[in-house]
Every structure is written in structure tokens, then in C-alpha cells.
Amino acid sequence: MVNIKSLLRELYEEFSFIKNSLSPSEQDEFDKIWFKKDDGEYENALKNLTTYLYKYYKKEVILLIDEYDNPLISAYKY
């Protein structure tokens, strides 16, 4: 089973190209999530990522969380 830290790491890796546009402290926080460090701010990881994307693109960011396949997975289990 994939855990939340792994999912967040994959997401941060997908957007790793924005890292160089961040401040040094933001880059440090970015790396903590990307490399699954224990002291990363995982509870704020999605919020922080949307902030980083806003700074990079200079546009509002909309985060969509999709769980469309959850009913199928649940049905398969039972």
C-alpha cells in the first residue's frame, strides 16, 4: 500500500522544475518533502506546493483531488 509520504514525494518530483524559482528556505522545505525527510511539513505539503506553483506561474492554482476509482477498489475487495 502506498503511503501519503510516497504520494507527496511523487507529486513534488513531478513539479521539481519549479524548485530553482523558490527562495532558499522554500527550496529546503521542498527538498524535505521530495526526499521524504522526517522533519518535512507533510501536513502543509499540498498547501505549500500550491503556493510554490502560484509563485512560479503567477496564476491562481486549483488543486483537484480525484478519487473516482475508490468505489471500484472497494467493490473488488468485497
Image: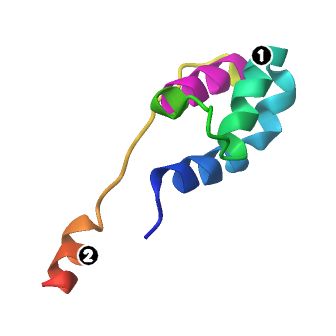
Label 2 is placed on what type of residue?
A: Ile
Specify the quadrant of the image occupied by residue 74: bottom left
Viewport quadrant of the C terminus: bottom left
Q: How far from the left and from the top, in percent, is residue 48?
A: 57, 24
- Vertical order, 72 against 34 (above or below): below
Q: How far from the left and from the top, in percent, is residue 69?
A: 30, 68
In magenta, the rendered stretch is: 46-56
The magenta stretch spans residue 54: yes
Judging depth in this view, the residue of 12 and 28 nearest the camera is 28
Specify the quadrant of the image occupied by residue 24: top right
Label 1 to label 2, Cα distance in Å?
39 Å
- For the question of whether residue 23 can be seen, the reply is no
- For the question of whether residue 53 can be seen, the reply is yes
- The residue indicated by pointer 1 is 25
Give the number of the disc on residue 73: 2
Give the number of the disc on residue 72: none
SS state under label 2: helix
SS state under label 1: helix
Callout 2 environment at 10 Å: few (<14), some (14 to 19), or many (20+)?
Answer: few
Who comes first in sequence, dot 1 or dot 2? Answer: 1
Label 1 is placed on what type of residue?
A: Ser
What secondary structure is the stretch in magenta mostly built from?
helix
Considering every residue shown, the one lying at the far left of the view is 78
Q: How far from the left and from the top, in percent, is residue 3?
A: 46, 58
The magenta stretch spans residue 26: no
